Image (tube, grey):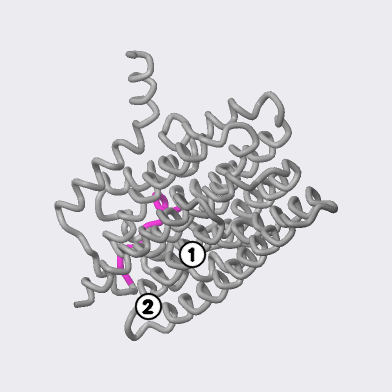
Amino acid sequence: MTNLYKLIFMMTLFMGTMISVSSYTWLGTWMGLEINLLSFIPLLKKKNCPLSTESSIKYFLVQTLASTIFLFSILMIMMTNNMISDLMNINQLMMMIINTSLLLKMGAAPFHFWFPEIIEGMNWINSLILMTWQKIAPMMLLSYTLKSSNYIIFIIMMSTMIGSIGGLNQTSMRKIMAYSSINHLGWMISSFLNNEMIWMIYFLIYSFISSTFIMMMNMFNIYYLKQMFSLMNKNFLIKFMLLMNLFSLGGLPPFLGFMPKWMIIQYLSNNYMYLIFFMIMMTLITLFFYLRIAYTSLILIHNELNFNMMMNFSMKNNYIVLFLSFISINGLILCTLLFNFY
C-alpha cells in the first residue's frame, strides 16, 4: 500500500513538472509548480522520523513563499500590460522578481538558506529527486525570463562561491552534495549568458553522475564521512569507483564531469573571461573537499565500527553501479572517440 501511494505521488510529481514546462500561460506554469510541490511533500514524510517531518514543513513553507512571489509577479505583469506609462521598466522589475522566486525554488545562492538544512532530513532517493528533477521546471522558466546580464553574473558568482566554501566544514555527505549542487547550479545558470541549450547537457551529465554516486551511497547506507572511511576497507573496486565518481563530480579531467564545464568555458571565454576565472577558482575549492574525502578515506583505517551499518547491498545493484561508474569515469574519452569517428 505504501509503495502504491508513493508511485501515485511520483507520477503527479512528474506530471506537475511537465505541465509547468509545456504551459503557454504564466498561470499554467504556476499550477504545474504547485502540483509538483504538493506531490513531493508526501514523499518526504517517513514514520517515526522527526527530521523528515521538519524537512517537509520547511520545504512547504519555502516553496509556498516562492510560489506566492511568483504568482504576485505574474498578476502584476498582467495588470501593467493595460497601462502605457513606463511599461518597460515595470516589466523588467517584475521579471527580476519572477527570477528571484524561481531561484528561491531551486535553491540557488543567495537564496540557498533552506537547501542544506532540508536535505539533511531526507533519505538518499529524495535527496536525488530534490537535486535533479525538482530543478527542471524552475530552470526552464528561468531560461525564458532571465534577461539582465548583471543580475545573472551576481547569481553565478554567489552560487559558485557559496557552493564551494559552504562544503568545506561539513561532515554530512548529504550537505556536501547539497553545496556541490549549488556550485553546479552556478555553472548551469552561466550558460544563459551565451547559449541557453548548454545547461540541458550540463544538467543531464550532472544528474547521471549524481545518480551513480548516490546509488553507491544508498547501497552502503552511508550518510556521514566516518561511515565512508569505514567502507573504504571493505572492497578495493568499490573504493576506486566511489573516489573516481567524486573526481568526475568535481569536474576533473579526463572524467565525464569535465565535459560540460569545458563547453561552458569555451562558449564564455570570449566575453566573460573574468567570470570564467572566478568560477574555475571556486570549483577548485569544491574539488579540494572531494580530494580531502578521497585522501582521508584512503589513509585512515577503522578496524571496528562503532555504529550500525545496515547495507542495502545486492550483486545486481553492484553490477549496475559498476557499469554506471565506468561510463562516468570514461565518458569524456568515449565521447571524444565517437566525435572523431563521425
Residue that appears at 68% across and 34% down: 277
Q: Residue furthest right?
A: 85
Towards the viewer: 174 or 307? 174
Residue placed under numbered mark 2 in the picture = 45
Towards the viewer: 1 or 71? 71
Towards the viewer: 15 or 162? 15
Give the quadrant of the N terminus.
bottom left
Q: How many marks?
A: 2
Amino acid type of the residue tagged 2 in the rendering: Lys
Work out whether 135 lies above or below 276: below
Q: Are marks 2 and 1 in contact (CB under 8 Å)?
A: no
Q: Examine the image and state in which quarter residue 208 appears.
A: top left
Give the quadrant of the C terminus.
top left
Residue 98, magenta (yes or no): no
Q: CA distance from mark 2 to mark 1?
A: 23 Å
Q: Examine the image and state in which quarter residue 313 appears.
A: bottom left
**What is the x, y in percent for residue 304?**
30, 68
Residue that appears at 57% across and 71% down: 62
Residue 297, magenta (yes or no): yes
- Magenta stretch in the rendered image: 296-305
Residue placed under numbered mark 1 in the picture = 31
Amino acid type of the residue tagged 1 in the rendering: Met
Element at label 1: helix
Main SS of residues in magenta: loop
